[in-house]
Image (cartoon, coloured by chain):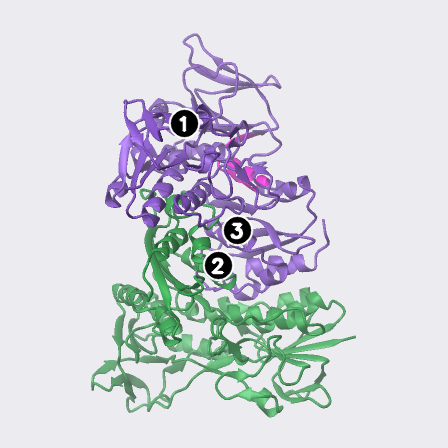
Chain colours: A purple, B green
Amino acid sequence: MKRVVVIGGGSAAGAPAAFTAKLFYKDASVTLIKREEKTLVPCGIPYIFGTLKGVDDDVFSNERYKKRGLSLVIDAATKIDRERKVVKTAGGREISYDKLVLATGSSPIKPPIEGSDLKNVFFVEKNYEYIKRFLEALSGKKKAVIIGGGFVGVELGDELRKRGLEVSIVELMPHCLQTAFDDEFCELAESKLKERGIKVFTGCKVESILGDEMSRVRGVKLDSGEVLEADVVVVTVGLKKEVSLATDAGLEVDERYGVVVDEYQRTSDEDIFAVGDCAFKRSFFTNKPSMLMLAPIGSYEARIAGANLFKLRRRNEGVIGTFSTAIGDLALAVSGLTEKAAEAEGIKYVVGSVEIPDKHPPTMPGIKRIRMKLLFDAKTETVIGGQLSGGYVVGEIANIIGTMIRKRMTVDEAATAQVGTHPLLTAPPAFYHIMQAAENARVADQR
Amino acid sequence: MKRVVVIGGGSAAGAPAAFTAKLFYKDASVTLIKREEKTLVPCGIPYIFGTLKGVDDDVFSNERYKKRGLSLVIDAATKIDRERKVVKTAGGREISYDKLVLATGSSPIKPPIEGSDLKNVFFVEKNYEYIKRFLEALSGKKKAVIIGGGFVGVELGDELRKRGLEVSIVELMPHCLQTAFDDEFCELAESKLKERGIKVFTGCKVESILGDEMSRVRGVKLDSGEVLEADVVVVTVGLKKEVSLATDAGLEVDERYGVVVDEYQRTSDEDIFAVGDCAFKRSFFTNKPSMLMLAPIGSYEARIAGANLFKLRRRNEGVIGTFSTAIGDLALAVSGLTEKAAEAEGIKYVVGSVEIPDKHPPTMPGIKRIRMKLLFDAKTETVIGGQLSGGYVVGEIANIIGTMIRKRMTVDEAATAQVGTHPLLTAPPAFYHIMQAAENARVADQR
């Protein structure tokens, strides 16, 4: 019997890798080794703090492994013996494999900020026990400062606000969500944060985290000298790839971009695959290395690797990058390149924008307005990016745009999108957002 | 100056035809001739009866024509003089054109049912004054029977229920929405109708509509002999294409499928284009004539014709057909071929199904479950259809599927969809509906 072993947290990348392996190779034994009994759903972590009832509401079910005939080993993989094709664990196990998938993920960057070891300073660790302690520590707290205004910082800020805390977000760059969106969408996000009573400090560097005589956090000092009072501080400034197992096993690992893989997700050892945050990625647009780390990219790569284990069937075309978030009732989403990113790559482009209700006619109750901006490559006329804001439906609309990007649809194809519309469910047929934004781009000047 | 004239109702097809013409040919004069001052948004008509505040809430704004520099003529076109290139109107106007676009639409079929001329028997006419009278006639009414369980019948039934009427729907075929969905989705729709207190009579033929001594409707007699009491009856059994102007002008017109056009939307007179319900269509899948009449198809064809008027730029690839509806809080959507349709065409296919929450983790408040079925051509392995039910977001998810169909994405591409996910906005990354349904199809047996 062929033996497949997956090492990983067992969520967005590890789980679909294991399931896909079992789907394609029914006769193989598939074993998932994961460190903790209770795996948190990573993107759900901010929601533990407000929308969900607690940490147990964000646990990835282990039931489905048994149901589909997979084996689950709760243990920490400590070493890969490539000669003997064995994974060793902290619990003393030796687990043999014919094919191994690494889905070891990422963990929060811990920048060397003075005072980050104080009591009530937290990172957004993807760890059940840690997050449980973090949640418990919030009891009685009144003022939170979040260092880092990326997706996790913004979402966590919104959730802590839902709990009733006073929240400040400190971001080093000129805007929150700066790397994901162009400025006008960042500004929409910041307006909504402020509308919800969250203080936003952009373009601000943190000098140190201040403590009291009991080594409890009492505030955050900015390099302007200003001190933001806090009885809890969260540091969320990005992710670093977990690659030590791969490095120790002598696999090729890029210091910045992670475990090197080919387009089939094979590492430098062709019996070992890597997927998800830990794995090297290339941009769909430029073929250059990409730092994107997103759950659905993990799932995408997992389904490529899982199918390819014993026969190469699927190829990674490079990552497009589609992501979305919500602040209060405002959702924001992006797929592919922003103007900033296109400019940085020297790609000439045209832009088409539109603002349109998400239902029709515009008198329909519960309408929210969708703002959309599409980018098309000036030379090939194919869609290379889209950004939008509106109600919660924009999360899936971004996936229409992502699909158009992947299939390299032209501006004329996008302007004549074959879509379905309905008064309660979508924008109007005559001015459907994607059609109309593309039509506007069709006659726009190149940037 | 080049003169473009569009004849139409001025909504889903006529309006984008006129706007697209102006966008591509800025120096042209663009005139829209429409019969009524107030054009109803056609797909909004059922919602006039419950969700909207009245008929004036469903009027297509005339403001935007002026804003974009178009001319509007409120008059009925009565004749096209192709020799002189002039449109004559009931008001005695003669309007010259270099290029003419016909967007004359469709109107409700009026089957020869005995009693359909009784008082308080209505059709769903796309006409402001008529619908206003219909709405006024509902005052004090208690029992409505709707003859025809297609989209309009089902939506109108749901809306009349919202007004508090007792509603029965009578459908000749075995199921409501029979031509749009496979049986399991029709059954979901029927269950929801019943849950909302609507009586559903499927597989039932209407023998006659019964009146009282004052020629007011009093009920509907089925061929089983059963009589359904009613003080208002709505007949909505389909649409017929409005082609008389084209026929009178000697253009080639197919008796069933409408004004014959080529792939550029040109009629047999190359200075006259036709778009929307009145125009001949071919199936994207089979290239055979198609009876689909949908607002977004009108918009699609209008944007092809509008761009092609003085230079051929866009081509109609055949219509895919994506549509959606809602009954109470349940939305249903379909894109491309159903199993029934594939079987009828002799297309061998594989099916992948999935049921998954529309947010994640599954403890997230406000979750609705999405049921999805995808069809892939067994030979080419490309996606040819999708059906789904769930919350209102399924309307836009169907547009992801429609885009995949258009670009002939394979089952492996769909299983490795590059999407964005978010706890509040979408299904989970590890089991995203389209990925998972495609993955299930990947290992399914051919049908």
As helix, strand or loop, the secondary structure at mark 3 comes to: helix
Q: CA distance from mark 1 to mark 3?
A: 29 Å
Mark carried by residue A402:
3
As helix, strand or loop, the secondary structure at mark 2 comes to: loop
Q: Amino acid at mark 2?
A: Met
Mark 2 and mark 3, same subunit?
no
Looking at the image, is mark 1 or mark 2 nearer the viewer?
2
Q: Amino acid at mark 1?
A: Glu
* Residue B165 in which image quadrant: bottom left
Q: CA distance from mark 2 to mark 3?
A: 13 Å
Which one is nearer the viewer's eye here, A229 or B218?
Answer: A229
Q: Which residues are magenta?
A: A186-200
Image quarter where the C terminus of chain B lies is: bottom left
Is A191 one of the magenta-colored residues?
yes
Which one is nearer the viewer's eye here, A382 or B347?
Answer: B347
Q: CA distance from mark 1 to mark 2?
A: 38 Å
- First in sequence: mark 1 vs mark 3: 1
Q: Which residue is mark 1?
A: A125
